Image: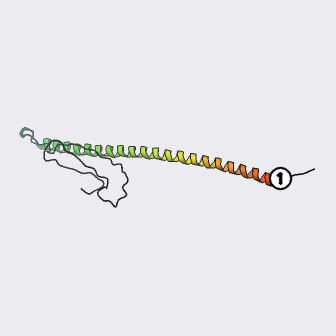
């Protein structure tokens, strides 16, 4: 297909087992080869629209079929929105975890730097005391 995002529709010519392949840019070696998270959902809908029987013909029946088609489209849009929302929640949870890990590392490193600073400052104080000390001999 070539597109990196959006909604794709595939009409199967016959029923049975269908396989999907989702690529991560491995085809093009000039890419950065980083792993990427993708979100996808499969929905199976009948390919034939609802048709009226002979005894259902009439202005109200046609209006009902039109309303049913619009309700189906609305339901499909709602499910797509829920899919996107679920993917965003998953991505947010991943980024929160990553952010917390980074913050923990920063705090640990800052604490280690602070301890090193205190040790070096204490060593310098002791050294300067010893250097400035005047010895008195009787």
Q: Is residue 70 left or right of residue 4?
A: left
Q: Residue at x 68, y 51 (%)?
A: 120
Q: Is residue 103 left or right of residue 24?
A: right
Quadrant position of residue 57: top left
x and y percentages locating residue 16 in the rendered image: 15, 41
x and y percentages locating residue 69 in the rendered image: 19, 44
Label total for image: 1
Q: Residue at x 87, y 52 (%)?
A: 135
Q: Pick whichever, 57 or 32, lies toward us.
A: 32
Quadrant position of residue 14: top left
Q: Is residue 112 left or right of residue 88?
A: right
The image quadrant where one finds the N terminus is: bottom left
Quadrant position of residue 55: top left
Q: Residue at x 29, y 43 (%)?
A: 79
Color encoding of the figure: rainbow
Residue most extreme to the front = 138
Q: Is residue 37 left or right of residue 57?
A: right
Q: Secondary structure at mark 1?
A: loop
Q: Pick whichever, 29 or 73, lies toward us.
A: 29
Q: Which residue does the numbered mark 1 point to in the structure image?
A: 133
Residue most extreme to the right = 138
Residue most extreme to the bottom = 30
């Amino acid at each position: 297909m070539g597109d990196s995002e959006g909604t794709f529709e595939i009409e199967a010519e016959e029923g049975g087992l269908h396989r999907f392949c989702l690529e991560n840019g491995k085809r093009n070696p000039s890419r950065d080869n980083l792993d990427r998270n993708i979100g996808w959902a499969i929905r199976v809908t009948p390919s034939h629209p609802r048709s009226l029987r002979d005894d259902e013909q009439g202005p109200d029946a046609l209006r009902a079929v039109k309303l049913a088609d619009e309700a189906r489209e609305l339901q499909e849009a709602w499910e797509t929105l829920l899919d996107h929302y679920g993917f965003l929640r998953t991505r947010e949870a991943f980024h929160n975890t990553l952010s917390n890990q980074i913050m923990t590392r920063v705090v640990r490193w800052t604490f280690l730097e602070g301890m090193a600073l205190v040790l070096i400052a204490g060593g310098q104080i002791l050294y300067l005391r010893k250097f400035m000390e005047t010895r008195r001999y009787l």
